[in-house]
Image: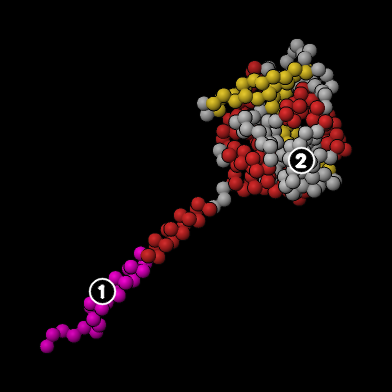
Amino acid sequence: MGMVYPFDIRSHQEIMRKWFGLALIGFLLVTLWTMIDSRHQVSPAQTYSQQMMLSHIHDTPVASQMVAQAPSVEVMGDRVTYATVDGTPVTGYLARPADATEPLPGLIVIHEWWGLNDNIEAMTRRLAGEGYVALAVDLFNAQVAQNPDQARAQVQAATANSELLNENLRQAYQYLETEQQAPRIASIGWCFGGSWSLNTALLLPDQLDATVIYYGGQLVTEPEQLSPLQMPILGIFGSLDDNPSPETVQQFESALNSLGKSAEIYIYEGADHAFANPSGTRYDAEAAEDAWQRTIAFLEQHLKA
């Protein structure tokens, strides 16, 4: 009589092959799902651009007589190449008082999510009229949006590689410091530019002499990240804005105060995102004018004193 087994070896081998096959199919399905899911994961650049999109629903950069508001003194402005980033020359808009003969304090002017358009050039001339050499940088490779969809695409493309934006702004500072011999330099920006005005301060924490943030979509609220900042900060926001919300602005202010930083933060009641843009549909003339006066006084104190 042959040896008796408690089970059929061939049946056992068949079961093992089936289990192995099922396991292999499961592994392949999980791998495929991971690949599909990774393609649909939202990047930080996509998230930020979508948040900006929601803040600009029904907003367009429409023409306005306020855009043509003349500087307080005659200024001259022209296109200049101020940087070379990733092998590509970058052209911005430089303005200064026409009768200036001595070096002036410098301003890095950072555009909204629409890009370096006519409104930003006009604002740059208006700032220059207050006694500054003002450089409007271009972070969108000469692209200017006419509607929110185009603007969202610009923001997403630009912020996908933030190091290129950092290098752009770093060279803007160097241009004002060396080419224009500006004794002191501040950054100022609106909307997307407000976020990047703060980013410029974080990039140059002990070099920049002041920074102005108009309703930047992204605010850093962690004290450890804000700790290196050495310059005074002016923040201008609206109570109806949700990007950033008043709660986020208050967290930003609390973090700065806890670190003993010099910060002036204003939230304008009834004002929405982009309320200071005279070429947009959110323009609030009263709030914008008050914010302008605060901005000029702040820059006068910290760049000219």
As drawn, is 4 to the left or to the right of 67?
Answer: left
Name the one closer to the observer, 35 or 60.
60
215, 227: nearer the viewer? 215
Q: Which residue is mark 1?
A: 13
Q: Residue at x 65, y 40 (%)?
A: 151
Mark 1 surroundings: few (<14), some (14-19) or many (≥20) residues within 10 A? few
Disc 1 residue type (three-letter): Gln
> Could you tell whether 130 is left or right of 93 in the image?
right
Is residue 35 placed above or below 205 in the rendered structure? Answer: below
Where is residue 222 drawn, in percent x and y? 67, 46
Seen in the image, is 276 located left or right of residue 20? Answer: right
Residue at figure coordinates x 18%, y 85% from the top left: 4
Q: Nearer the viewer, mark 1 or mark 2?
A: 2
Q: Nearer the viewer, residue 239 or 57?
A: 57
Magenta segment's dominant SS is helix
Quadrant of the frame with the N terminus: bottom left
The image position of residue 52, as x and y in percent, is 68, 45
Which of the 4 image quarters holds residue 289?
top right
Secondary-structure class at tag 2: loop
Which residue is at a point 72% across and 34% down the rendered structure image?
A: 189
Determine if residue 250 is in view.
no
Residue 247 vs residue 70, the one in the foreground: 70
Which range is magenta? 1-24
Q: Quadrant of residue 302?
A: top right
Type of the residue with mark 2? Ala
Give percent across and percent down for residue 47.
62, 48
Q: Residue furthest right?
A: 286
Return the mark for residue 274: 2
Residue 23 inside the magenta-drawn segment:
yes
